[in-house]
Image: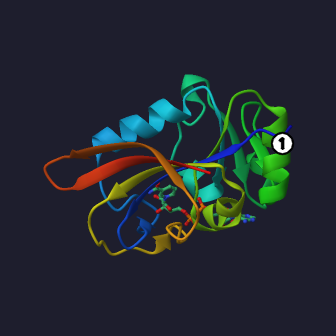
Amino acid sequence: MPKPLTLVVACSENRVIGRAGRLPWHIPEDLAFFHAVTAGQTVVLGRICYETWPRVSLDGRTPVVITRNRALARPDVRIAGDVPEALAIAQTLSGEIMICGGQRIYEETLPLASRLLLTLVHAEVPGDTYFPEWRHLDWRETERRESHDAHFRYTFLTLER
Ligand SMILES: NC(=O)c1ccc[n+]([C@@H]2O[C@H](COP(=O)([O-])OP(=O)(O)OC[C@H]3O[C@@H](n4cnc5c(N)ncnc54)[C@H](OP(=O)(O)O)[C@@H]3O)[C@@H](O)[C@H]2O)c1
């Protein structure tokens, strides 16, 4: 039986996830949540996300990086040429499979995901990378926690199907 896929994402009301290669906000509570839920797991991520997360292998994470550049492989970093190859590798590794973006990877894996750990940031922000529309899919909300900082209100949601 294949392991289920979990997508982990923080997105704004207008589905923005990134701007100029970075997060469009700095929300320490969400970063802490993201690090905690991915610790000890297999994380599947695109090359840009990988380059902006130098400590991805800390806390027992096993990264599977999607890129055409096989030279990025290291003893602790698996390389895959596309999403199907990344998922096949991830299935052989220990821990849960957590999909960490970016845009194309979320687009290709959302139809396959059984769980979505979504931090919904209650703002409309400008950006250049987006999470695909998820609201029309048949989710069961199993957890919800509202929070805020000095700049944003946000909701931690667990959606399952
Ligand atoms: N808010 C959040 O939760 C969240 C989560 C993730 C990312 N982000 C933001 O999103 C932005 C980065 O995402 P991104 O979408 O621009 O980049 P990305 O997915 O991290 O990296 C793009 C690169 O990954 C490879 N790639 C991605 N999808 C592929 C596919 N389906 N098949 C083959 N190769 C693929 C290609 O690498 P090569 O060019 O090396 O071949 C591509 O150039 C940043 O702004 C980041 O902060 C936000």
For mark 1, does the 10 Å Cα neighbourhood hold few (<14), some (14 to 19), or many (20 or more) residues? Answer: some
70 or 102, nearer to the observer: 102
Q: What residue occupies the far left of the structure in this picture?
A: 150
Rendering coords of residue 140 (x, y %): 52, 51
95 or 159, nearer to the observer: 159
Instruction: Give the SS element for disc 1.
Output: helix
Quarter of the render that holds ligand 1: bottom right
Which residue does the image show at 80% across and 60% down from the upper left? 82
Inspect the image, locate mark 1, and give the three-letter code of the amino acid beneath it: Ile
Depicted 147 relative to depicted 22: above or below: above
Which residue does the image show at 46% across and 34% down from the upper left? 35
The quadrant of the rendering that contains the N terminus is: top right
Q: Is residue 14 left or right of residue 132?
A: left
Depicted 41 relative to depicted 25: above or below: above
63 or 84, nearer to the observer: 84
Q: Is residue 144 left or right of residue 148?
A: right
